[in-house]
Amino acid sequence: MNHERAVNLERSLRDPVISKLVVVEIYSVFSRLSDDPVPLAEYAIRRSKAKVEEADFNEALDLSILLSGDLKLKTLDLIHASLAKIIEADRFVTFDRDILNRGLDPLGIEVLG
């Protein structure tokens, strides 16, 4: 459903960056699809050419608490948004309907999807 949209979006991105939370989600997805998810997850991350950006998760959790009232997102989405702010992302790529509908304007981050 979103595969073609994701491929087109990926082609338009320059210098993509992901957090370790995205890495965890990639491993989680492949762990449900394969008995040996590590090579698949590593390949997917390499293929995306995304740089894994380090961020302090305690800082992300503290920021998530502060932003919860403004963003009104589910927990993991709120943490993803907070990590994006911490790593100074200017764009946030997602197909999550809540984030697409609400946006991340309070963070000054453009949402693409």
Image (spheres, rainbow, N blue to C red):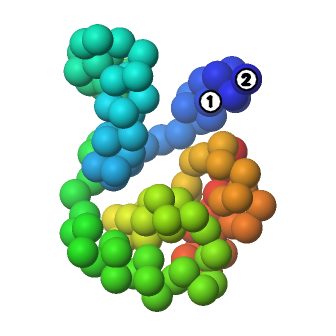
Q: Please tell me which of labels 2 and 1 falls first in the chain.
A: 2
Relative to the observer, which residue lies in front, 39 or 31? 31
Count of marks placed on residues: 2
Work out whether 5 lies above or below 72. Answer: above
User: Quick one: SS at disc 2?
Assistant: loop
Can you identify the residue that label 2 sits on? 1
Query: Residue 69: x, y in percent?
Result: 60, 86
Q: Is residue 75 left or right of residue 25?
A: right
Q: Amino acid at mark 1?
A: Ala
Q: Which residue corresponds to the image point at 44% horizontal and 77% vertical from the top-left?
A: 64
Q: Is residue 85 left or right of residue 38?
A: right
Query: Residue 83: x, y in percent?
Result: 38, 65
Query: Residue 111: x, y in percent?
Result: 65, 57
Q: Are marks 2 and 1 in contact (CB under 8 Å)?
A: no
Q: Residues within 10 Å of mark 2 (few under 14, many from 20)?
A: few
Relative to the observer, which residue lies in front, 4 or 79? 79
Work out whether 47 lies above or below 95. Answer: above
Work out whether 40 lies above or below 91. Answer: above
Can you identify the residue that label 1 sits on? 6
Q: Amino acid at mark 2?
A: Met
The image quadrant of residue 38 is: top left
Q: Does the image show residue 23?
A: yes
The image quadrant of residue 92 is: bottom right
User: Quick one: SS at disc 1?
Assistant: helix
Q: Residues within 10 Å of mark 1 (few under 14, many from 20)?
A: some
Query: Residue 46: x, y in percent?
Result: 30, 25
Q: Which residue corresponds to the image point at 53% horizontal and 39% vertical from the top-left?
A: 13
Q: Which residue corresponds to the image point at 55% horizontal and 32% vertical from the top-left?
A: 10
Gap in Å between the C-alphas at discs 2 and 1?
A: 9 Å
